[in-house]
Image: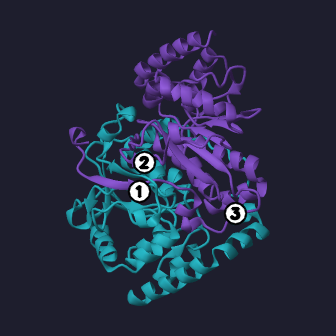
Chain colours: A purple, B cyan
C-alpha cells in the first residue's frame, strides 16, 4: 500500500450476513432467512456497485458472502478496501444469488483471469439467480453465462454484450429467466429492490425502499446518453476511449473462446 | 474483531483523494482541483450514506479526507470497515465541504460524544459548506450547526430537527445559505450531485451523473411515507420505535445544552 502513497493502513473486517447489521435488524419476513447471497469482489471494482445492492440485501436475514479469489482485501475505485469473507475455494456451493459488480478497469482484468472465469462458470450453473450491476455483465458474459440471454450493462459498453452471445436490452434492470443484469453504478439500487422482490416478495422490497428512502430526485437530467445529449455523451466517451476500446478487444476474445 | 465473530481480518487503506481512483481519472475541469472535502466517519454509520457522495466527490480532483475521532477503522451497518485517513486533531483546518453521514444507532452515540461535537463545531465554523445525509443532520444539529437554518433528515426522525433550533423543510435536498442537508440514505446521490454543482458547476455535475448512469427507475413507489402509505410507514416506525424514541431524548437534551 505504501507504494501507492496512502497515509493510513487499517484493519477492516468483512460482512458476515445480517447480524453484522444490527441497525437494520428486525426487518425479516418469513421466507428470507436462510438465503445465501454470494457477491464477487475484485480489485478496481466500483464500491457503489457493491454497496447499493449490499445495503438492500443486508436488510434481509440473508447470509451475504463477499467472495474473492484470495483472502486479500480488494481495492475499490474510491480507495476503500473491501475484505472478502470467502474465497473461490471456500464459497458455498449453491447460492440463491450470484452477484457481480462492475468497474471497467477491474472488470477487464477479471475477464482475463482464468480462476475467476472458472469460478463464475461453476457457481453460475448452481445459482438460483445469476446477476450483475454495471460492467459486471461483461464478466458474466466472458464466463459464458449470458449466451442466449437478454442483458444490459453500463451504457458505454453495453453494445459489447452481443460479442459474447447476449442480446442487448437497453433497460435499467433486465430479467431474462434467472439472469438479472442492470445498468451502470447507481442502477444497483433499482436492481437490489428487484432481486429482493423476487426472493422475498414485493412487500419486503417496499419496506426496504422506505427504509433507505429511495425516492430519487436527481437535480439534473443527465443520467443517460439520451438525457445528457450528444455533446456530453461524446465527451465522456472520449475520456473513456482507451478503456472502452480495450473492453471491445477483451469481449471479442472472450466471445472467440466461447465459439461465438 | 475476533470477539465480534468475523471470519476474516484484512488490511484496508484509506481514501486520499482523486488519485486513489484511477478508473475515474481525467474528469477534472478547471476549478475543482485543490478542493478539500472532509467526510466524518463513525461507528455504525450507514456505508451507503458515505459511498453515494464519496463516489461523486471522487470524480472531482478533490482531496477527500475521511475524518474520525481516532485512527481506528470504523464499522459500518453492512459490516465493512472504513479506515479514516485523518483524525480530529490532524484534519485540515479549512474545508470546502464538511460532510456528516447518518445511521441512527451511530448518530445517537456521536451526538453524545463531546470530542465529536467539539470537532464539528470548530470545523463547521470554517467550512465553506456544512452538509449531511440521512440522520447526519441530527449530529450537525447537536453541534449547534443547524440553529436558525432550514434542514432535513431521514423521514422517520426529521421532526426532531426543531428540537435543536432548525426549521424542518421536507425536501430531498435542502440548501439554506451554506448548509446542505439531505433525506435518508439514497438521498446522498442527489445530494452529491447538488454539492458538485455548487463547487464545480452544473456541467461537471451532469458529466458525473452520466458516468454513474444516475437515471433512477425504482421498481416500486414506496420511497417516502406518502408513497408507501400508512400501513407500511407505521410498520417501519413500529420496528424502529426504540431508536426513534431514544433519538428524541438525545435531540431534546442537545437542544437544552444549546439553550433552545
In the picture of the structure, the residue carrying the numbered disc 3 is: A28
The C terminus of chain A - image quarter: top right
Residue B164 placement (x, y as % from top left): 46, 81
Asked if residue A247 can be seen in this view, the reply is yes
Residue B156 placement (x, y as % from top left): 61, 71
The kind of secondary structure element at disc 3 is loop
In the picture of the structure, the residue carrying the numbered disc 2 is: A83
Asked if residue A153 can be seen in this view, the reply is no
Say which mark, if any, is on residue A215: none
Residue A31 placement (x, y as % from top left): 76, 57
The N terminus of chain A - image quarter: top left
A54, A17: nearer the viewer: A17
**Residue depicted at 31% across the width and 62% down the height:** B72
**Is residue A4 found left or right of B110 in the rendered image?**
left
The kind of secondary structure element at disc 2 is loop
Instruction: Judge whether B153 appears above or below A85 on screen.
Output: below
Amino acid at each position: 500500500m505504501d507504494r501507492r502513497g496512502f497515509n493510513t493502513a487499517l484493519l477492516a473486517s468483512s460482512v458476515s450476513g445480517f447480524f453484522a447489521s444490527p441497525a437494520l435488524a428486525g426487518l425479516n419476513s418469513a421466507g428470507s432467512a436462510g438465503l445465501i447471497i454470494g457477491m464477487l469482489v475484485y480489485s478496481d471494482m466500483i464500491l457503489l456497485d457493491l454497496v447499493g445492492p449490499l445495503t438492500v440485501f443486508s436488510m434481509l436475514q440473508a447470509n451475504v458472502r463477499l467472495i474473492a479469489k484470495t483472502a486479500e482485501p480488494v481495492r475499490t475505485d474510491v480507495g476503500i478496501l473491501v475484505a472478502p469473507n470467502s474465497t473461490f475455494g471456500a464459497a458455498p456451493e449453491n447460492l440463491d444469488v450470484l452477484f457481480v459488480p462492475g468497474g471497467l478497469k477491474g472488470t477487464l482484468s477479471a475477464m482475463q483471469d482464468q480462476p475467476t472465469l472458472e469460478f463464475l462458470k461453476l457457481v453460475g450453473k448452481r445459482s438460483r439467480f445469476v446477476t450483475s450491476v454495471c460492467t459486471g455483465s461483461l464478466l458474466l458474459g466472458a464466463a459464458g453465462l449470458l449466451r442466449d440471454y437478454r442483458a444490459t450493462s453500463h451504457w458505454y459498453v453495453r453494445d459489447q454484450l452481443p460479442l459474447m452471445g447476449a442480446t442487448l436490452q437497453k433497460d435499467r434492470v433486465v430479467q431474462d429467466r434467472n439472469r438479472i443484469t442492470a445498468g451502470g453504478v447507481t442502477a444497483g439500487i433499482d436492481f437490489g429492490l428487484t432481486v429482493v422482490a423476487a426472493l422475498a416478495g414485493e412487500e419486503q422490497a417496499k419496506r426496504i425502499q422506505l427504509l433507505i428512502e429511495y425516492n430519487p430526485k436527481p437535480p439534473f437530467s443527465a443520467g443517460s446518453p439520451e438525457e445528457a445529449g450528444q455533446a456530453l455523451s461524446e465527451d465522456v466517451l472520449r475520456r473513456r476511449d482507451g478503456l472502452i476500446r480495450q473492453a471491445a478487444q477483451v469481449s471479442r476474445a472472450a466471445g472467440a473462446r466461447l465459439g461465438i
